[in-house]
Amino acid sequence: MIFIENEENTDPRLNLALEEYALRNFSSQQDYLLFYINRPSIIIGRNQNTLEEINLDYVEKKDIQVVRRISGGGAVYHDLGNLNFSFITNHDIHNLNNFKKFTAPVIKVLNHMGLQAELKGRNDIQVEDKKISGTAQFSTGKRMVSHGTLLLNTNLGEVKQALNVKMSKIESKGHKSVRSRVANISEYLTLPMPIEAFRTLLLEGLQEEREPFVRYYLTAEEWKAVRLLKEEKYDSWDWNYGNSPKFNIQRSKRFPVGEIDLRIYVEKGHITAFKIFGDFFSKEPLQNLEKLLIGIRYKKTDITKALKNSDLEVYFGTIIKNDFIDLVYGADPEGVQ
């Protein structure tokens, strides 16, 4: 495995650009590992509606950067007390959404540090029912990235202030607040540990049962390409926020695969706009599903017919098609014609 040096950059937009550049351009004959630490920022899941996930006034006041990542899942808060890890490998259908496989070596290192860490739920590493890490994946069809956070000494007060957590998430986990579900790794250590020491310890632990990692430093030309990707994509408002769609129907429900939030615009009995948001993990672009419903009558029979040949699992994971149809269609709300 090759360890990519990010040269101590803490700009979240540059680090996410580096991760995507490596995913799409580095050799398919090698596996790569990337670590990075971001200054205060909120990292939004690919399919989320940014403005509904953040406390915009607080974020702007505190100059917290907001960046959308290429993988699905929920919004997370990063700061200098949080270590991010990324494994870049060839695509394998058996590894996609197999969070247990790629988190196992990380959990092993945490256990050696004295933590009783384990993977729980869809994609969280927990200690004593407290989340210390969230993970996500993205695949190009040829290559895939499996990445996650490790909360060593993050300012958890900022998590609560900067993120607007939907009530469906809180209720589904049976807790009253974000703070009650999240913990720092430092809380379970007997002695304080700087983030740099933690980074070194994790890197050494991941190498224990492998050949020593080869360290790779990007060339000047590669850094130039990474910065261009940052400027064109990760610096853009369209990517990080995007226009909120016009809609007159909103329907949302939390499924085992995550929350699905629909925005539908119905005019003269026909669907003229359809947008899907959520913290689920999709294998295929949601636009492929959304366009199937544009132009059809807002009737259950028509919706069912339009989705007849669609495999919803490539968009959401394991879900019953009729449950999704029931979410799309319900009693016509006031104002829909």
Image (cartoon, rainbow, N blue to C red):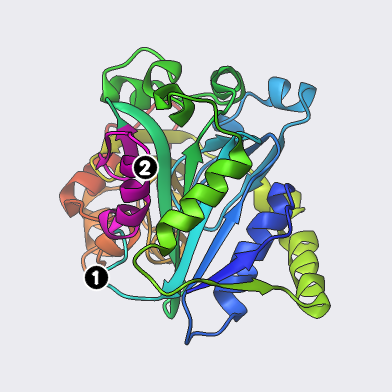
Which of the 4 quarters of the picture holds residue 4? bottom right
Relative image position of residue 157 (x, y in whole percent) = 57, 17
Number of residues whose C-alpha sits closer than 10 Å to that of mark 1, classed few (under 14), some (14–19) or many (20 or more): few
Q: Nearer the viewer, residue 323 or 266?
A: 323
Whether residue 233 sits left or right of residue 162 in the image: it is: right
**In 3D space, how far apart are the residues under numbered discs 2 and 1 (Cα atoms)?**
25 Å
Q: Nearer the viewer, residue 232 or 42?
A: 42
Name the residue that disc number 2 marks. 110
Q: Amino acid at mark 1?
A: His
The image shows residue 83, relative to residue 63, as above or below, that is below
Is residue 89 at all visible to an observer of this figure?
Answer: yes
Label 2: which secondary element: helix
Which of the 4 quarters of the picture holds residue 207? bottom left
**Furthest residue in direction top, as rendered:** 176
Picture residue at 67% right of the left edge, 43% below the top: 38
Relative image position of residue 97 (x, y in whole percent) = 30, 59
The magenta segment is 98-126
Relative image position of residue 70 (x, y in whole percent) = 54, 58
Please report whichever mark, 2 or 1, sits nearer to the chain's N-terminal start.
Answer: 1
Picture residue at 76% right of the left edge, 24% below the top: 62
Name the residue that disc number 1 marks. 94
Q: Amino acid at mark 2?
A: Leu
